[in-house]
């Protein structure tokens, strides 16, 4: 059985939100500096979402190379959601069944819903939703460090 309750908020996000300094884990592992690189086998659609999203995360100061795989899953979900939306726009929410010709829900609706749920979860983790951003307070100085102990000093 997993841990109960909500997942802990990452330390860098807690610091940006202005959490109390005595509640910060200064012994948390610190990922390397820099931005994640897009995997070579990513499609052109995924790469376009990747480039846009990494630019946004870089502007917020929240992306690290350790985020690569989670970020790819987010980008794949965005592309899947867009494709499902496009298919639904062409075929509609209800389609004729193969057996009796009765109207049934288009299976693409479930694909769209699943992609949206995945997208939403990762977007919240990365601070890419309005509610996630509303809890972040950005330091206005330019020399932000990545580790909690550097940010606390």
Image: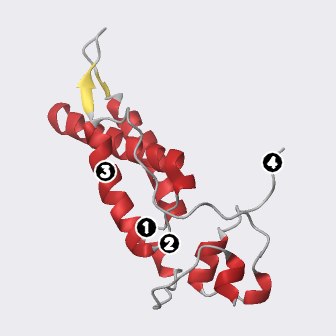
Q: Is residue 3 left or right of residue 47?
A: right
**Residue 40 shows in the view:** yes
Question: Which residue is labeled 1 in the image?
Answer: 129
Whether residues under marks 1 and 2 lie with C-beta atoms below 8 angstroms apart, the answer is yes
Task: Identify the residue at horizontal 31%, vertical 44% (top origin).
Answer: 47
Of the two numbered discs 1 and 4 on the same chain, state the one appearing first in sequence: 4
Quadrant where the N terminus lies? top right
Give the residue at x 29% y 16%: 97
Residue sitting farthest toward the left = 90
- Determine which of the numbered discs, if any, sits on residue 49 in the image: 3
In this rendering, is residue 78 above or below 21?
above
User: Callout 4 environment at 10 Å: few (<14), some (14 to 19), or many (20+)?
Assistant: few
Q: Position of residue 115 (x, y in %)?
A: 42, 42
Separation of disc 2 and disc 4 at Cα?
A: 24 Å
Residue 2 numbered tag: 4
Mark before the other along the chain sequence, 2 or 4: 4
Local secondary structure at mark 2: helix
Q: Is residue 2 above or below residue 136?
A: above
Let me know if residue 19 appears in the view. Answer: no
Q: Is residue 81 left or right of residue 86?
A: right
Instruction: Read off the residue under disc 2.
Output: 132
* Gap between marks 1 and 2 measured at Cα: 5 Å
146 on left or right of 88: right
Q: In which quadrant of the rendered view does residue 30 lie?
A: bottom right
What is the spatial separation of the Cα atoms under label 4 and label 3, in whole angstroms? Answer: 32 Å
Give the distance between the C-alpha atoms of the residues marked 1 and 4, in whole angstroms: 26 Å
Where disc 1 sits, the SS reads loop
Identify the residue shown where x is 66% and y is 68%.
9
């Amino acid at each position: 059985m997993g841990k109960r309750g909500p997942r802990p908020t990452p330390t860098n996000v807690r610091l940006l939100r202005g959490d109390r300094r005595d509640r910060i884990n200064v012994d948390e592992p610190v990922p390397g500096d820099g931005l994640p690189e897009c995997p070579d086998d990513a499609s052109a659609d995924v790469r376009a979402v990747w480039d846009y999203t990494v630019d946004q995360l870089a502007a917020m100061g929240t992306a690290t190379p350790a985020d690569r795989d989670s970020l790819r899953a987010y980008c794949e979900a965005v592309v899947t959601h867009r494709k499902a939306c496009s298919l639904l726009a062409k075929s509609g929410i209800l389609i004729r069944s193969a057996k009796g010709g009765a109207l049934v829900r288009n299976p693409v609706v479930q694909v769209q819903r699943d992609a949206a749920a995945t997208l939403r979860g990762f977007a919240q983790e990365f601070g890419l939703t309005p509610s996630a951003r509303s809890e972040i307070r950005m330091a206005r100085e330019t020399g932000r460090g990545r580790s909690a102990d550097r940010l606390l000093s």
